[in-house]
Amino acid sequence: MKLENWHLAKEAPAFAPLFNDILVTHRSLALKWTFPAPAQTAVRDLLAGFDLAVVDLPAGLGFVLPQSAWPTFAKRVGERFASDAPLQADLAALQAEQAVWWQAGAFRYDLTTTPLVYGILNVTPDSFYDGGRYAQTDAMIAQIEKMVAAGADIIEPGGQTTKPGGFVEVEPDEEWRRIEPAIKLIKARYPQVAVAVDTYKLPVMERALAAGVDIINDVNGFETAAKRHLLGQYHHVGLVTMHSSRGHEYHNLTAGMVDFFRANLQALQAAGIAAERICLDQGIGYAKVADGYQDFAMMNNVAALNQFQRPIMVAISRKGFGQRLFNLPKDERLGVTLIAEAAMYLAGGRVLRVHDVEATRQLVKLLDTIKQSYWTLPGHGEQQ
């Protein structure tokens, strides 16, 4: 047997851009499965369990599989045809081809199989949601312990707010004074957790990198040559590069964001930063009009960034859209946050940057369970 990409564009070249856009945007795989005639019943029976439309091809079948179904599909095919070595090799090759890796310091994540919950730890007096809550050492330690226990993959101390509506900039020394204890504590007690730092200041980046952090998150998208040169010297550190439109509006938002990230990725890679190190953040909450309807358009167009085959961050936790639509105070926005995160997660946002780790971990587990569940009777390859 052989399982391979089904190149739809070769059969209808005039529609190649449309086919490719549909597959990439909607995170689907077009596959062609060729097999000897005696295996046809077994193959059709297996595919029927995935509710797929199937097209007859010479010596085989063509079908489009949602990427979310891949783990279950690969498991069932691998078990049902365990003795077919070429088919097993094809499964491995297809898995490798679709994988989106993020190199983040001491960690290397496969985002196709492992969504990440990225915990926010603001040690500032004035952050928009939890400013002042964790500025004291005891409160900071308790919050780190809580996030680790809840299953945070990454924890990000932040010592400088960039909230909409204006903020007071602090000196790099003060920002570092705020975040250094948290960095040291996480690295010493929780080596299984990656450490990120949220900063746009070069001196703070320098100190954080020297301290061994795994990720630098810059709301300004590493806009200077000096920042890019610095990160180019640390060959394994991850980057979160953010798009911001606080200084302008777009005629076509999606096209403008795609153009930004295309140029941004090129600039980062030209500085010696491998694409595998880079995660993309749309910058929701950083529009020219704070908490305006551009934010909803960004929540809706996240799938347009799948074309870059990079991790996409969902960074909407407790933000002002909950106030705009429902007049909710900050402490009552968890429900709407989870709803919006779910929509963006299903569209391709695989790194969820959140204040509420436990609830987000539940969201991810439930959605993955639903999207990977396909019914078969006991004895047909899946235990009920």
Image (tube, helix red, strand yellow):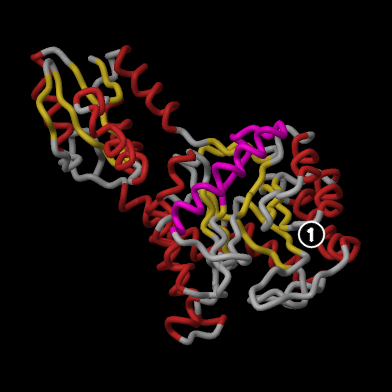
Mark 1: secondary structure: helix
Of residues 298 and 53, the one nearer the viewer is 298
Residue 45 drawn above or below residue 207: above
The residue to which callout 1 is attached is 182
Which residue: 56% across, 81% down?
Answer: 331
> How many numbered dots are placed on residues in this image?
1
Residue 348 pos. (x, y %): 42, 49
Q: Amino acid at mark 1?
A: Ala
Residue at the (73%, 54%) spot, across then down: 197
Q: Quadrant of residue 341?
A: bottom left
Magenta residues? Answer: 252-280
From the top left corner, tell me how far across and down residue 358 is, in percent.
Answer: 53, 63
Whether the magenta-drawn stretch holds residue 307 is answered as no
Quadrant for the N terminus, please.
Answer: top left
Task: State the residue lying farthest toward the right.
Answer: 173
Residue at point 59%, 66% (across, down): 286
Residue 186 is left or right of residue 324, and the answer is right
Left or right of residue 307, residue 26 in this image:
left
Q: Main secondary structure of the magenta part?
A: helix
Label 1 packing within 10 angstroms: few (<14), some (14-19), many (20+): many
Q: Quadrant of residue 285?
A: bottom right
Q: Position of residue 224 (x, y in %)?
A: 75, 48
Q: Is residue 231 left or right of residue 15?
A: right
Residue at the spot 49% in from the left edge and 65% down from the top edge: 359
Magenta segment: does it hold 265? yes
105 w.r.t. 128: above or below = above
Instruction: Give the left or right position of residue 91, taking residue 321 as reference.
Output: left
